[in-house]
Image: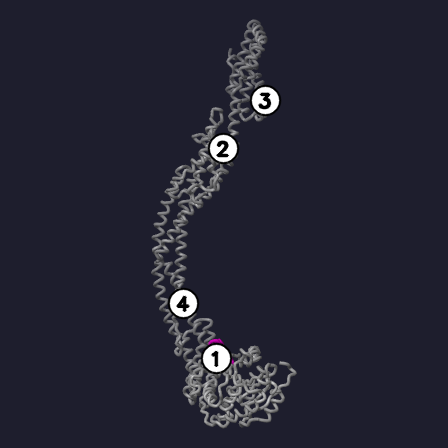
Amino acid sequence: MAKSEIRFSTQLIDGDGTFNVEGIEKFMKDVKLAECGLSYAVVSIMGPQSSGKSTLLNNLFGTDFREMDAFKGRSQTTKGIWLAKCAGIEPCTLVMDLEGTDGRERGEDDTAFEKQSSLFALAVSDIVLINMWCHDIGREQAANKPLLKTVFQVMMRLFSPRKTTLMFVIRDKTRTPLENLEPVLREDIQKIWDSVPKPQAHKETPLSEFFNVEVVALSSFEEKEEQFKEQVHELRQRFVHSINPGGLAGDRRGVVPASGFSFSAQQIWKVIKENKDLDLPAHKVMVATVRCEEIANEKYALFAANEDWRQLEEAVQSGPVAGFGKKLNSLLDTCLSEYDVEATYFDEGVRTAKQKHLQEKLLQLVQPAFHSALGHIRIGTFDKFKEAFDKALNKGEGFSEAANNCTGIFMAQFDEACADVVIEVADWDTSKVREKLRRDIDAHVASVRAAKLSELTTTYEEKLKEALSGPIEALFDGANNETWPSIRKLYKRETESAVSGFSAALTRFDADEETQKNMIVSLENYARGLIETKARDEACRVLIRMKEKFTTLFSHDAESMPRIWTGSEDIRSITKTARYACLKLLSVMTVIRLDDKDDTLNIENILAKALLDSPNEKEKKITTVDPLASSTWEKVPASKTLITPVQCKSLWRQFKIETEYTVSQAIAAQEANKRGNNWLPPPWAIVALLILGFNEFMTLLRNPLYLILIFIGYLLIKALWVQLDVAGDFRHGALAGLLSLSTKFLPTIMNLMRKLAEEGVPETNNPQPTPSTSNQTTGSSVSSTASSKVTFLERGTEYTASSKEE
């Protein structure tokens, strides 16, 4: 709405019922209504006095009708009928503000003007706003429905049918959704229409022939002004182009041209004024409706502000309140009794209806506190149940027995506590809260049962783990053809034992048969999974196991003694035997064999043919397909496969590479041992020595002294050889032997010389022999001394030679 736009208004009919002809004529000229032709619309509003009609129009259409001053009291503001032009709405829209009905200024009996003005509005307007309070919906003596009933009847009798839009404006909307209020209003309007006596011409005429019914809702202007204005702004948009097809008045009929509006309005008012026999509902009912509503609102406000109620409400929010029901019933009875005293002289039907509405509002107010009280009872009962249930289980009482006993006891306690919070005037059912408590108890019992069953399951799983893990590892460590049969036997024995005890323990928890069956199957699967996990772990270490086994078998004899490679061992045969044992270990670890049918698998033979080379194997590999060139074993599912054929081939290749060094070291040690034990030169060397050394040999025969010297040298060298332990030092290699001899050679020479010196000391004390005798003695002494020294060096014991005694 433009701020500079001029507002035009006039009093169309004054409070005495006089039609303002001059005023309407001037108004039409000011707004240039005659130029509009048929492009104009008329909107009017009707409703109880002081219900905010003028306020609504001023906010909705930008008019300046006089509004009631709330600070001066509730009194009549609009007298007669006022007419104004809506600001900023196309097409030209005229709005009529009617004097409110049920005003005390006219009195109880002078209601003719109210009836006439309402009928005039319906006859002249394209759109009639019916202002009503939200709390009046659904009441017979509210919302001007009795007045509408009479207006419908008289309108059909006086005027030809025209299409009028009735827009019910619901003021001070509550939480109730509009989609729930609208059907009630429409049903009431239809009932009024059906109950109106109709002339013969309109006996079968439907309501939609005369009226379009619209319903809108607005928030409170005083309490939610901003929201009220936003909603009014949205409603205003519906009046723009209201006469266009689809608009609020798009299907109106019998429209008077704008130039004849003044004359038409005068004639309609004249006919209405002259008709004295209009039978409208008694004004007394309307007054009773308003007054009883005021009393009810007053008592509701007093109850809500009551200090006892507020303390009770606050207390029940924080915890249980003893005697809650008794206290609340007393407060409600007092409030309703006070209402009955003040409303006793008003119409009984209206009084009863308002009392019921007051009771509903009061119950709606106290219902949260009631539910809080029930909630505290439920929570307290549930906590006591849990405590008692735990104590019963700790005392050793059976699970099912403890659950049933505690449930029965505490459900009975809950029922007793609920009786203390019951509201007498309310028919509220506590069964839902009771069901919630029962569900909580059942859920707690189920959770405890689940925890106990989980603990039981864990216990038996630990027992199975302890019974299976160690033996299985030992069986895999000494893998052979009996490994998997032994594992199956162990698995069957331990699983049957565990399942037997587990089944007996399950009966104490009142679990259904299907649950027990599933848990037993789960325990069996755990045992199987444990074995499979161990098998997979061992399969990951199979190469290490194979190398350890090979080393053990290769480096130790049948009595587990370390082998000394002296040269007589058959290294090839030992290697083949050790490798075959490792191949058998590999075949055991390739597939999980927990089923008896798995014994038919011939994986060991497949691996032996593919991995252990035979003399003709190389020729066969050229023409045959490699059986290990696959990622799966025949007739073995992937879930049971630990090592695939391809992986076996790769593992074996790596195994051979990593064990070849051990074999080569054994061969080298054997060769070294052979060389250490064979000190004779080759035969050809001996023949060469005999031929080439013939002259030297003849020289020795001709000169026996050389033989004696050579013999003495031999004895000395023999003594050094034994003392130095040359053969023992060279057993560990040439370099090690040379290093050892270099460190021992000089000390051994010195020791030998010392011993010879000691042998010669006693000879100086003997008398000088004769020359001939001396020569013989000297030769014999040298020979005996040398012989004695050799014996000394060989035995490693110090003693005196026999020649000394001679």
Residue 226 appears in the picture as rendered: no
- Nearer to us: label 1 or label 4: 4
* Residue 730: image tag: none
Q: Quadrant of the N terminus?
A: bottom right
- Nearer to us: label 1 or label 2: 2
**Looking at this view, is 302 or 389 the one in front?**
302
Is 180 magenta? The answer is yes
- Nearer to us: label 3 or label 4: 4
Up the image or down, 601 lies above or below 34; here it is above
Can you tell which quarter of the image residue 490 is in?
Answer: top left
User: Where residue 265 appears, x then y in whole percent?
Assistant: 54, 90
Q: Earlier in the sequence, mark 3 or mark 4?
A: 4
- Mark 1 element type: helix
Q: Earlier in the sequence, mark 1 or mark 2?
A: 1
Q: Please provide the residue range marked out in magenta.
A: 171-185
Question: How many residues crowd mark 2 within 10 Å: few (<14), some (14–19), many (20+)?
Answer: few
Looking at the rendered structure, the kind of residue marked 3 is: Phe
Looking at the rendered structure, the kind of residue marked 2 is: Ile
Disc 1 + disc 4, Cβ < 8 Å: no
Which residue was labeled with disc 1?
Answer: 304
Question: How many residues crowd mark 3 within 10 Å: few (<14), some (14–19), many (20+)?
Answer: few
What separation in Å lies between label 1 and label 4 (alpha carbons)? 30 Å
User: Where residue 619 appears, x then y in whole percent?
Assistant: 48, 30
Is 747 magenta? The answer is no
Which residue was labeled with disc 2?
Answer: 622
Which residue was labeled with disc 4?
Answer: 436
Can you tell which quarter of the image residue 450 is in?
Answer: bottom left
**Looking at this view, is 183 or 468 the one in front?**
183
- Mark 4 element type: helix
Looking at the rendered structure, the kind of residue marked 1 is: Ala
- Mark 2 element type: helix
